[in-house]
Amino acid sequence: MKRHVLLSAVLLAACGGGELQNTPLPKTPPPGGGTQEPGPPDPTLGFRRGFSNPGGMWMPEQLTLPQHAETLSKMGLKIDVKTLADPLGAPLGAIVLLPGCTGSFVSSEGLVVTNHHCVQGALQNNSTPDHNLVETGFLAKTRAEEKHAGAAQRMNVAQAFRDVTKDIRDGLEKIKDPVARKDEVDKRKKQIVAACEKDRPELRCQVSTYFGGGMYQLVETLEIKDVRLVYAPPRSVGNYGGEIDNWAWPRHTGDFSFYRAYVGKDGKPAEYSPDNVPYKPKQVLKVSTAGVRPSDLVMVTGYPGATSRTDTASEVHYDVDVFLPYLIAFLKERYAIAEAHVAMGGETGIKAGVLKQGVQNGVENREGVLAGLTKGDLVKRKDELDQKVKAWAAQPDKAAHKTAIDKLESLLADQRKTRKADFERGQTFSASRMLGTAIALVRWAEERDKKDADRKPGFQERDLPRAIGGQKQLAKAYDRAIDRALLRGSLVRAVKLPDAERPWLTTLLGAKPGAKIDVAFVEKTLDGWYSSALLEDEKLRLDLLQTGTPKALAASKDPFVQAALRIWPIYKSEEKKADARTGEMLLVMPSYVLGLREVQGGMLAPDANFTLRVTYGTVRSLKPESTAPADQPFTVGSEILTKNTGKPPYDAPKGLLEALKAKRFGAYADPSLGGELPIDFLSDLDITGGNSGSPTLNDKGELVGLVFDGNIEGVASNVVFNGATTRSIHADARYMIWTMDTVDGAKHLVKEMGITPTP
C-alpha cells in the first residue's frame, strides 16, 4: 500500500452587472434542432444556491447511499440515481481510461473526447521540426488521415466490477513475516487476474485497492491498443494562457481534443493496422450545447489518480514541514532543465516543451498545496479529525484497532527517517530513460527464469506487449541531451547527500574505493556512458526485453546495463525493505481508514486510485458575492479579444479572432450572457489529476463541458477538502463545438456527434 501520493502524481491542469441569474432562456434554436423553452420556475434552485459541497470522489455504487440520493434529488437530478450509479450503463459506461487522463465516447464510431493536454504525447509522436503538431494542432479530414497515437497508447473500457476483498484478505493476519504477507497478497491478486483473463486476450484485468487496503475490487477492462489522433486545436487555443493562467481564473482555454478507438475486423482489440475498423462502444454520451448556468447541478465522472486524504495527521505535518518544500525544490530544478532545452529548438525543443509543461504544472500544484495547508486551518482540521479517529479506537471494544493505529504511527515514523534519502535514490534510478530501461531489462531477465505465475507483478507475459509498446515509442520520446541533463541533475543532488545516505552512489557510478565522488566525477562518468550508449538502439532493447538472460546482460558492453547490474543487489535490498513495510501496513492501515469512515457517518470516499469515480456539485464562482467581471463563473469570447496580445501565451489564431470580432456565434451564443460565446466555466466540484479530460455532465447526464484544471487556492483539497476554496475549471462544450464548426473546419466531427453544424 503506497503512501505519500503527493509524489505519485508528479512522477507520473466577464460578465458585469452583478451575479448571473438563473433566468429562463429565450426561445433560441440550438444546434441540432429544437428549441429551449423557458419552462416553470425551478423548485430546486434555492437548495442548489445554498449547497455547500462536502467533497468526495465517490465510487459509483456509493451514490445509492441515502445521503447522496436525497441530495442529488434536491439538486434537480433528472435521471434515476441508480442509473447514475451503474458503472456500465449510460452515462458512466461511456467513460474510458487513458494514460494519466480520462476520455469519453461521443459517437457510435469510437470517437473519444479528452483534453488537449492529454494528447501531447500523440502530437509529439507525430511531429517533426518542420511539422510541429504540438504547436499547430491537427485535423484529420478523413478516417484515413487519422494518425497513430503511438505504440504505447492505450484506452481501457470498463466491462465488469467485482468485490474480491475476502479473496485477498482472508487469513493475512496468520502470516507473521511481513514480506511473506505482502507476497501472498501479490500471489492472490495474480491468481484472480489470471482467472479473469484466461481465454480472453482482449481483456485487461486488475485488482484495485480501496480504503487503505480494507477493500479490493476486480476491474475488467477492454484494452484498446489502436488509438488514433483525430483532432487537436492549435496550442494557441488548447493551451491559451499557458503557464501564466495555469491553476488560475478567469480562463479562456480551449482544452479539448479527440481520439478514435480502433479494433480488428472481428471487433476485438488489435495492434495498430490500416485494416482495423472503428470500435463500436456500448454507451455514448450525448453532447449538449444547451449550456449550464450559475447554481446548476453538474457532475464529473472519470479516473482521478491520487489523493492523500486518508493520511494520518503526522504524515501531513511531515509533508508541510519537510517533504513538500524539498519536493518543490527538486521540481524547480527539473523545470530549469526543461526550459533550457526548449531553447535548443528542433526535436529536442519539442520534447523539452512537453516536459516543461508537465513539470511546471507539478511545481505550481505542490506550491499551492503547501500554501493551502500553511495559510488556512486545514492542518488544524486534519488534527481534529485524527483525534476523533484515535478517540474512536480508544473505546474498550476497539482495542485491536487501537493497537493497529499505534503500529501504523510507528511504521510511518520509521519511514520518515530515510524519506529524503529514499526519494533521491529512487529519482536517480528513474531520472534517465536509458538507466530506467536498463534496470527494467535486468528485472525482466531475472523474472524470465521463473514460472509465469511466480513472477513479480508487472513482469509476467501479460505485461510484455505493453513493455514492447513502450520501447517502440521510446524513440520518439527519448532525447540524449534531455536524458543526460535529467540524470546529471539527480546525481548532483545525490553527491550533496551525507555519505551515510548514499552508499549506492559509488556503486552506481562504478567508482573505485576511495575515489572522490564530486560533480566533476559525475560529468566524466556521464560523458563515457552517453558516448557509448548501445541501448539507444531500439532493436537491441527489444531483443533484450523479449529474450534477454542474466548471462546476456552480463556480457553487454552498454554502460547503463553495467550500471544497472552493479546496483541490482542494492535495488533488491531496498525493495525488500519496502515490501516489509507494505506487508506491515496491510494489517494496520485499514483500521485507521475504518475509523475515518466511522467518525464521518460512513460518508467517506476512498482516496483516488485511477478507478472510476463520480463527483457532483454546482456551477459556482470562487466569490459568488462579488460583482467583478473576473469573479463571474463564466468567461466569454469578447474577453479573448481584450486579453490577446499576439504573443504567446495570448496569441489566439487569426481565424478565431476574426470570428469573435464578427460575432459569428450562431446558435452557440448564450442569451443569458448577453449573447456572448461562452468559453470556460467554474464549479465547486472535487477533482484531481487523472480527471483531466473527464466529461462534465448536466442534470440529464449529457456532456456540457470538459474539466481541465482547478484553482490554485483549492489544490490543498487533495489532502484536506475545503469546499469554500476548491473550484474546478471546465471548457464549455459550446466553445468546443463552435471552434470545430466555425473556425477549424471540423464540421464532419460535429455532425458525427449528432449536432447539426451551421451552414
Image: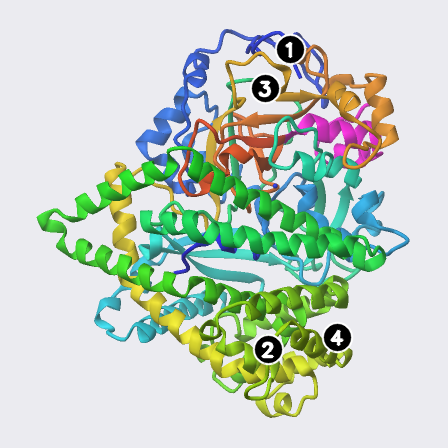
Q: Are marks 1 and 3 in contact (CB under 8 Å)?
A: no
Measured Cα–Cα span from mark 4 to mark 2: 27 Å
Mark 4: amino acid: Glu
Give residue 572's position: percent from left, percent from top.
46, 78
Give residue 296's position: percent from left, percent from top.
52, 20
Residue assigned mark 1: 16
Classify residue 200 by image quadrant. Answer: bottom right
- Give the numbered dot on residue 517: 2
Measured Cα–Cα span from mark 2 to mark 3: 54 Å
How would you rate the neighbour count of disc 2 (Cα within 10 Å): few for under 14, some for 14-19, many for 20 or more?
some
Earlier along the polypeptide chain: callout 2 or callout 1?
Answer: 1
What is the span of residues highlighted in magenta in the rendered image?
731-759
Classify residue 227 by image quadrant. Answer: bottom right
Residue assigned mark 4: 536
Earlier along the polypeptide chain: callout 4 or callout 2?
Answer: 2
Earlier along the polypeptide chain: callout 3 or callout 4?
Answer: 4
Disc number lying in front (2 or 3): 2
How would you rate the neighbour count of disc 1 (Cα within 10 Å): few for under 14, some for 14-19, many for 20 or more?
some
- Give the numbered dot on residue 631: 3
How would you rate the neighbour count of disc 3 (Cα within 10 Å): few for under 14, some for 14-19, many for 20 or more?
many
Mark 1: amino acid: Gly
Disc number lying in front (2 or 1): 2
Q: Quadrant of the N terminus?
A: bottom left
Residue 338 part of the magenta-drawn span: no
Measured Cα–Cα span from mark 1 to mark 3: 9 Å
Give residue 471's position: percent from left, percent from top.
69, 70
Disc number lying in front (3 or 4): 3
Location of residue 376 with respect to 402 vertically, above or below:
above
